[in-house]
Amino acid sequence: MPDASDDAADAERWLDLDVKLAYQERLIHELDKLVREFGARLDKAERELAEIKQAVPPPLPLGAANEPPPHY
């Protein structure tokens, strides 16, 4: 037959588990929010990069194509 000390120990374990669960749930929500924010920032950065790539003219090829022949 369980005695009062076993009941108190069980109640303390349950309380400890409840507290840990509450902290984990809060952490999960905070991390989810952070991941969503970084996802939005990444999407924005990718759009801006695409716009920059379209706005910048392509580079000129280097080498013999841009150099005058040696007899000039």
Image (tube, rainbow, N blue to C red):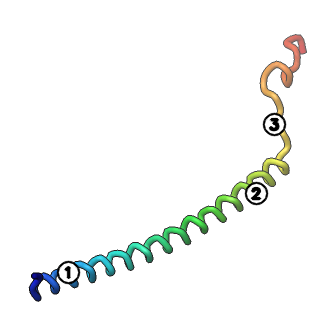
The percent coordinates of residue 15 (x first, y second) are 27, 83
- Of the pair 68 and 33, the residue shown nearer to us: 33
Badges 3 and 1: C-beta atoms under 8 Å apart?
A: no
Amino acid carrying mark 1 in the image = Asp
Q: Which mark is residue 10?
A: 1
**Position of residue 33 in the picture relative to residue 13 (left or right):** right
Q: Quadrant of the N terminus?
A: bottom left
Judging depth in this view, the residue of 46 and 15 nearest the camera is 15
Q: Residue at x 50, y 74 (%)?
A: 29
Amino acid type, mark 2: Arg
In the picture, residue 11 is in which quadrant?
A: bottom left
- Identify which amino acid the numbered label 3 is placed on: Pro
Spot occupied by residue 52 in the image (x, y as percentages of width and height): 79, 52
Tell me which residue sits at (75%, 57%) in the image. Answer: 48
Q: State the SS at label 3.
A: loop
CA gap, disc 3 and disc 1: 72 Å
Rendered residue at 84%/22% (across/down): 67
**Residue at disc 1, secondary structure:** helix
**Residue ID for mark 3:** 59
- View extreme (front): residue: 1
Q: Position of residue 4 (x, y in %)?
A: 11, 88
| Residue that sits furthest to the top in the current view | 71
Disc on the earlier residue, 3 or 2: 2
Instruction: State which tag comes first along the sequence, 3 or 1.
Output: 1
33 relative position to 14: left or right: right
Pick the residue in front: 6 or 27: 6
- Name the residue beneath numbered marker 2: 47
Q: Where is residue 66 in the image (x, y as percent from the top left)?
A: 85, 25
Distance, label 3 to label 2, CA atoms, is: 21 Å
How far apart, in angstroms, are the residues tagged by discs 2 and 1? 55 Å
| Neighbourhood count class around disc 1 (C-alpha, 10 Å): few under 14, some 14–19, many 20 upward | few
